[in-house]
Structure formats: C-alpha cells, structure tokens
Image (tube, grey):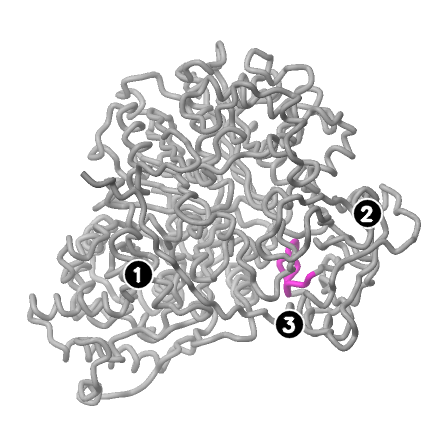
Amino acid sequence: MSEPVTSIRRPVRLEYDFTAGRAMSRFLLGLAEGRILGQGCPECARVYLPPRGTCPTCGVPAEEEVEVSPRGTVTTFCVVNIPSQVLVVPVPYVCANILLDGADVPIFHLIQECPIEEVRMGLRVEAVWVPAGELKATFESIRHFRPSDEPDAAYDSYREHL
Amino acid sequence: MAERCAVIGVGQTKHAAKRGDVSMPGLVREAAARALEDAGLTWRGIDAVVIGKAPDMFEGVMMPELFLADALGAVGKPIMRVHTAGSVGGSTALVAAYLVQAGVHERVLTVAFEKQSESNAMWALTISVPFQPPVVAGAGGYFAPHIRAYIRRSEAPAHVGMLVAVKDRLNALRNPYAHLRLPDISLEQVAASPMLWDPIRYLEACPSSDGACAMVLTNGDGAKRSPGAPAWVWGTAMRSEPVIAYGRDQVNPRAGRECAADLYGQAGITNPRREIDVAALYVPFSWYAPMWLENLGFAEEGRGWKLVEDGVTAIDGDLPVNPSGGVLSSNPIGASGMLRFAEAALQVQGRAGEHQVDGARVALGHAYGGGSQFFAMWIVGSEKP
Amino acid sequence: MREVAIVSFAQAPSVRRETERNEVEMLTPVIAEAIERSAISRKEIGFTISGSSDYLAGQPFSFVTALDAVGAWPPIRESHVEMDGAWALYEAWVRLQIGDVDSALVYAFGKSSPGDLGEVLALQLDPYYLAPLWPDPVSLAALQARALLESTGYTERDMAEVAARSRRDAQSNPNAQVASDFSVDDLLAEPYLVSPLRKHDCPPVSDSAAAVVLAAGDLARRVCERPAWVRGIDHRIDPHYPGVRNLAESPSAALAAREAGVGDAPVDVAEVHAPFSHQELILRDALGLDGRTAINPSGGALAANPVMAAGLIRIGEAARRIMEGNARRAVAHATSGPCLQQNLVCVLEGD
C-alpha cells in the first residue's frame, strides 16, 4: 500500500503590468529630480504623501502639487529582526513612520546610519538620496532616512499624527 | 421591520499550522458539518451560504467559493463571498445576519476559513508592486509602531504585553480546537523569546494556522424549532475608515469607537464594562488587548492595561477576555474573526466547555482588519432581545 | 419587502488598456458622478459596498485603497465582496431591507488588463483537479458552445446574429469598447478562434469601473424622477465541474429568474451578462425571454466586459432605461465563474 497523496505542487507564476496612475507618476517623476511631491486637498487643505490623486477623507480629487521637505520627524517606529524576502537590508533594521515637514500624514521608511538604540520617537531625520546621476523615477531614489542632528521634536508636535 | 436573528449552530475545525489531512473542501466541510449537526439540520435545510476568507493569494485560488460551492451544499442556492481583510470572519457573519434580519432567508450557513499552508502566505502579502514603497516588514512591522505609540501614550508598563501572551496561551489549554498548546508558558519564557518587530516578541504574536469556523443563523421561528438554546443577536455593526487620512488615530481608531457605540446603542448597553460578561476580541499581537479594551469603552483611554494587570480580563476575572485563547493561540486569518463571533455565541449558550465563563449572558464578538481600519462586531445574549 | 430603487448609475467608458489611471483613479470620477446624480450627499449615504478581485488587480487587499475614492471619513458602514459588483448590489439591497439605513453606494472596479486574463481566470478553477491543466476561459466556453450546438437546434449563425446585433447596438453606446456593423455572413466567413467560437463570439478584454446608488421608499421618490424599483432579485449557483452539469442549460439562471419573478409580466428590455455569444442563447431560454424583449441594447458584454464590473453595469444599464423613461419593466443579469456557473437576476420596474 503506497502512502496517500496529501498534497500536489502547482507552481503559479503570473505577470502583471501595474499602472502607476497619474498621481503616483507625478510623485515618481519628482523623485527623479530629487523632490518629494505631495498633493493638497482642495477641501480640507491637508497634504497627502505619497499622493493618490484623491483626498481619502473628502473623497474629492486632490491634484494640487505641494513640494514637501526631505526632513521630518520620526512619529513612531519598530525594529525588525526578521529578514525581508524583498528588501536587501541586514537585520535588525528600523522601520519608522516619518512625518515630513509640510506633509499631514507620515510615510513609512527605513532609518539607517545610526545605532538602533538611538532611534526614538521625535527624532529628526533627513532623506538620503542616491547620487544625483542615479536618480530615477522609483522609490529607491531615496535610500533611507538618517538623523539630521536637529533637536528632537516635542511629543505634542506630532502626537496627533500617531 | 427587521427580523430577530439567532445563532443555533456553531462548528469549528481543529486549528493547526498545517492541516495536511484535509483538502480545502474537506476543511470547510469539517466546520460546516459540525455547525449543521449542532443546529439539528442537514444540508438540505439551509437556504443560503455566506463564505468569507482573506486574500485569495493565501491559497492560490481566485474566488475559491466557486469550487467550494459543491462541498458546501450550495448548488441551486445563493452563495456569497465576503472579503474585508482581517475583519472578514466577522463581516461574513454580519452579512449572514443581514440575510436573516432582512427577512430574505430563514436559515443561513456562514463559513470562514483560511488554509495558509496551501500557499506561501508571507509571499502572498509581500508581492512587490514596482512603484510602491519598498519597505515591507510584514504585518508585525506594520502594527509594531502603533503598539510603541500606545505604550508611549498610555505609559503602560512593559510587562503588560507579556501578561496577555501568557493568559491567552493558558486559556488555550482549555480549548480542544486551539492551535498553540504551550503548557509551560510563563512570563520568563515570553520575555526570553526573540524580539521580532521590537516591541513585539515572538511569543507576543499570533501563529499562522489552517482552520475554519461555521455557524447557522436563523430567525425567531427557526430558533423556536432549534434543539438547543440559541444565542440571540442583540446588535451588529461594521465601520471602515481610509488607510491614510489626516486625523486617523491608529492606536485608538475612530471607526472602532463609533462601531462600538452603534453596537451598544442597538443592544441597549450603556456601561459595557458592567453589562458585558465576556469579550472575544481580535488580538493578533498581545498589546492589542489593552488597546481594544480602551477603543471599545471597557476602560478609559490610557487605562486598558490596568484591566490586564489587575487580572480583570482573566477567565475568572470580572471581564474575561478571550477565554478560548483567542487569535494569539489560533489564527486561520479569514476565520479568525468568525471564531470570535462564534466564541461569543458559545459563551452565552453556556456551551464553551472548559473555557466557559460562569454565568455569561451577554457577550461581545469583535474583529478588525487592514491597518486597524475595518471593524465588525456583534453582541449576543442568552435572552431574546 | 421594503421598496428599494436604483436612483443613479455611472460608469467609465470601457477601454482595452487604461495605462494612465490606476484603479482608484478610474473609480473616483465614477463614484463622484453616481453620487452627484443621486442628489444624496456623500455623507448621507447609509451603506457602502464594493465588488472586485485581488487576482484581477494582482495585489492582495486591492479593495482597501479604493476606499480613498469614497471619502470614508468620518468612518462609514462599509463592506466588500470578492465578487462582481452585481452581488455587492444584492448585499446593499439586503442591507436596505433591515430598515435602519435608507441609501447605499455600490461600486465595482474591473481593470482586466494588468495580467493575462486567460491565465488569471484559470485560477478560478478547482485547484486540485482543473487548474493544474490551465484551461483558459475561451476553451471552456467553446466546450459549452459545442454542447449547445450539438444538443439543441441552435447554429453558429444564431451565435453570429447575437454578435452582429450586439456590436451594432454598441455603436450607440458611448461607453462600449467594441462597436461595428458587420453582416452575419461576413462574421461566419471568419476563421475559428477555438472552434466553434470565432473572435466575434468572444468578449473583449476591458478596463472600466461602475457605481450605482440605491435608495429606499420615499427617499428614492424624492431624489429621482423615475426610480428603477428592484421588484425581485435572486442569485443561484450551479456545480463547479463542467463535467457534472449540462453545459447547454443554465439551471441556476432559470431558478434565479423564477425567484426574481421575471415571468410575472412582459419584459421591455433585458441586459444579460453573456460574455460569449452562445451564452446569450442559453440565458434567453433560462430567463424565458422572447422576441418581445429588447436584449442588450447597450451591446452587452460582447461590446465591453470589464471583469467584476460587467454584471453591475448590466444592472445599471437596465436601470438607466427605466430612469430615462424608455422602459417600464427591465431585467438585468450577471454571471460569474466558468461557463455561467453562478447567476444573478434582477427585475426592475418604473412606477
């Protein structure tokens, strides 16, 4: 009597051509120029990043382009100890929510170039770009963020963005 | 005018990292057949089926309800498929309840499942879309920063997360269906477990499970004919908010607060801490227990951790939370929400076995999903509303 | 049952490949238009529900970002089905029966172009017995067409007549993707794609999005001059395996039609979701439609078939005829799964 068959292998490979969309396309073209472009909502005036073309709170087109600063504040973060399948960064590494100056919602990115123990809520950071000649219309144009040697932001200045 | 709705059958599978002994149809049938038996019904007695699960990529089958229709006795009947991320098990039960409350059907079978071992779940969640941010850190990496924000905001002592992790695993020892069985679990063991996504330790995180849950819901007439005491639905509510929005509070989400307020209003509950006897909360990472206790109004903002620390949420406490061991002990994602709803029903039916809370008459079932943005809840009671 | 009506409908023109806008960007103007036409403000909508597929979009949780197009703040009552938007509309209709909310927004996005649709839809099949063979939807439909031709009096000419009429009617539909004026003889002179199907028997690959607003009772009367009342709605499913059912018939569509009351009175217009020409022949019989009913004046799925939205668009098109005063009683149908496995039927009436 043979062993029962408990599973079959069926490799599936599907390829998709994703559409970046108009909003993301403008954002990525901004990165190729070393600029971070958000979008402002005509109703609530909040600046969203990365832009989606709509204001998620008002549900209206938000197409006004607003350049935000490459500097910001770590609102909160975590230390990842599990190697990522898609990200080539040695563990442990820090993922943080970063509120860029001029934006109203934080983005999620890596904090590098500083000891992990020194990452804290309120830490001021700045974007580290790839060399100017290598800037492209991809997220990878920003390598990571690093401390900007400014004094920490006060808790009250970012608590409503947690 | 809405019909009354009651749970008259509950069934679930044994949850495990890999249920290699059953196919997907076998898994859903195991739960569904138990729910039917519990309700004293056969497949023929069911008017419609509502099935839910999380992303199709977990099993590698697009809209699997199409091929599962045969196994679920749905041929010739209406079958619907719900997908609302992690809250889906709860949302699925709510859609089934709507069918009864709307007077469309008398007896509805609702099923939720996940068979994550069929595919590579980690892969399914980390498909790299070329123009999306490159930082992918898994579910834990998403939620860990919000836990840190909670700890900072509430000034909760660091051991609270560990207390929850131990309590739920000890509760799971009373639940024969639970996936994780860790009889030696202790604070020391949790503290010594690897820090996966600081501040989340390995033993403070949920496992990944294969499993299914099913319930039979019916109206007032159907409940009269049911063999056992039904669990009556006193209120149902769902709320969603966007992923990114100015003013979103991911520690204490507004959608959760408003969902609970709607629910309590329907159930006539003014003081949840006093009037709810047991709560089945969706806690995939231990720190979410105090966070949800606040979000749901069981504690003031910033004080949820005190209920944990004071033992209020223990199985013999004043407000037992997750006596079955919860998501921290079994996590078939798509079914996890329905398991909370089903646990609430079992408790008020007095049929939760070894993890029964004495005298439970009113219970809350809770599920959440996405980036703490989708909420589904119900309150069930032993008395007719 | 509580009286519920469709009070507005909007859709994006179907195109073969929308390269500029992503799903959310396609959806945003459509939702805005449906809401504006409904004369119910965004914040007053009582329930929101969508239909879409992660495999179609190629991303898990693809419906989550679509919430951005809704403006879900303050938080809303919202749900999602991994089904065609027609089933989302069904859930909304059920939700409105309970009586505590009076209006609902239903939307669907179907961008079929990112992946290879044939490969994607093959993943809908039983993963143990069928999917490993990668049967594509055209081949499965051809099996069905063959079964129909061999077991009934229908001919390839009947199929070509469906195709010719659909594409001709599509010429007056600004949202249609494929519109042309060919004679049946011209079509029959074309080579087979997968015998007995020719190219014209098959649907185009389409990108689109659609939204509908439902309202109950007095609210519907207040906001809409000619509400399209949902007089009956039902959906049923057949067995999955093509080998265990008679592919020449659609018992689930027939049952849903009976439950929805299609045969209770004459039908002026029917929008039938038949992606393949022979499927319209099967569905006409299942729904009991005869020559007195105008079928698919929009051109139907042969003119545009945005997967996950095409069924909702059938309901919207049928409702539009009533809202515009061009029909009194209309039937809409949606299908899902291989070879018409699952079917929904909706009967709409004007006052």
Q: Are labels 2 and 3 assigned to the same chain?
A: yes
For label 3, the SS is: helix
Mark 2, residue position: A115
Output the chain of dot 3.
A
Specify which label sits upstream in the sequence, 2 or 3. 3
Which x, y percent locates residue A19? Answer: 54, 70
Residue at image mark 1: C332
Q: Is residue A56 magenta?
A: yes
Q: CA distance from mark 2 to mark 3?
A: 34 Å
Circle 3 residue: A25
Mark 1: which amino acid?
Ala
* Helix, strand or loop under label 1: strand
Is B144 on the left or on the right of B232, as rendered?
right
Mark toward the viewer: 2 or 1: 2
Q: Which residue is found at the position 42% from the left and 78% from the top?
A: C174
Name which residue type carries label 3: Ser
In three-dimensional space, the C-alpha distance between marks 2 and 1, rounded to whole angstroms, equals 63 Å
Residue C252 in sight? yes
Q: CA distance from mark 3 to mark 1?
A: 38 Å
